[in-house]
Amino acid sequence: MIIQNRVTVMDYGEGYAEASWGRSDTITKRKPLPRGRSKEREINKEKSKRQAMASVRRKCMAAGLDHLVTLTYRENIQEKERAWSHFVQFIRLVHTYFPDWLYVCVMERQERGAIHFHLGVKGYQEVDLLRSLWRCVAGDGNIDVSYVKTGKGAQWKRQRLASYLAKYISKGLENELNERRYRASLGIEIPKQIIYLHPAINPMEYVMYKLESIAGQVAYVWCPEESKGLYGWACSWG
């Protein structure tokens, strides 16, 4: 059995990059936890949630999303399947006008139980048109578009919007193991590079070097003490 250090680097451009590292078994694969018992089921659900949060963050970063769109209902819609059906119809209508419209969408449940959607999108939005399209499928609903002013104009900082959307993966909604937790445009490619290191090379030191060479800085590092540097995560933003 060959054990190597595996480093995954994602370069999003404009000084945004992240990397993770850990031990990799290049011959045998880890067996998935069984789903029959409640303890393992909860472990798998937590793992699925973390993976979905990471996917939302990475897709937002890769697509350069910088505006937030919120879709709401006037009616108290609480059925997830019905709400997702409305959302899919809405996206089809939007794409008839804007075929290349990119988005990453998460669902949230309000205190009254009603469902609404948060979407990360890119650039200026035709709010009146989007509102009319949403009302075609949702009835008397509404759309709100928000941004945060930065040095580059009226937009969210990429990492802030990505983190904002990712947090809704675990907020207020119970998800089954195989249930889709978010929706995103097809074709958002995450710029991922996987590197296998010789066991003699310290993976954490390599990640620090790699991030600095790509983005110019390392702003945050997560590395549990018990790992002794053998696994962790780092990024170029604070």
Image (spheres, rainbow, N blue to C red):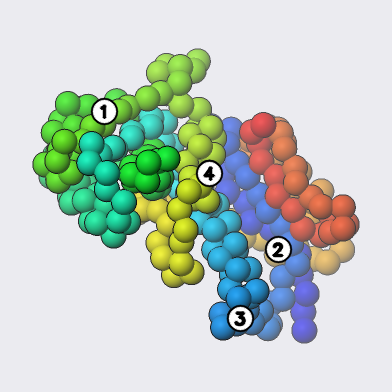
- Give the alpha-carbon distance from disc 3 to disc 1, as whole Å: 47 Å
- Give the alpha-carbon distance from disc 2 to disc 1, as whole Å: 40 Å
Amino acid type at circle 2 is: Arg
- Give the alpha-carbon distance from disc 3 to disc 4, as whole Å: 27 Å
Callouts 3 and 1 close, C-beta under 8 Å: no
Image disc number at residue 167: 4
Rendering coords of residue 12 (x, y %): 52, 41
Mark 2 or mark 4, whichever is nearer to me: 4
Residue extending farthest front: 112
Q: Is residue 136 visible?
A: yes
Mark 3 or mark 1, whichever is nearer to me: 3
Of residue 109 and residue 156, the one placed in the foreground of this image is: 109
Which residue is rendered at x = 22% and y = 41% of the image? Answer: 75
- Give the alpha-carbon distance from disc 2 to disc 3, as whole Å: 31 Å
Mark earlier in primary sequence (2, 4): 2
- Give the alpha-carbon distance from disc 4 to disc 1, as whole Å: 24 Å
Which residue is disc 1 drawn over? 125
Which residue is disc 2 drawn over? 6
- Classify 194 as above or below 191: below
Residue at disc 3, secondary structure: loop
Image disc number at residue 37: 3
Mark 4 or mark 1, whichever is nearer to me: 4
Amino acid type at circle 1 is: Gln
Amino acid type at circle 3 is: Arg
Callouts 4 and 1 close, C-beta under 8 Å: no
Mark earlier in primary sequence (2, 1): 2
- Classify 13 as above or below 194: above
Position of the C terminus, as image quadrant, is top right
Q: Is residue 122 visible?
A: no
Give the class, few, some or many, for how many residues have Cα within 10 Å of label 4's Cα (few <14, many ≥20).
few
Of residue 85 and residue 148, the one placed in the foreground of this image is: 85
Question: Left or right: 231 with respect to 146?
Answer: right
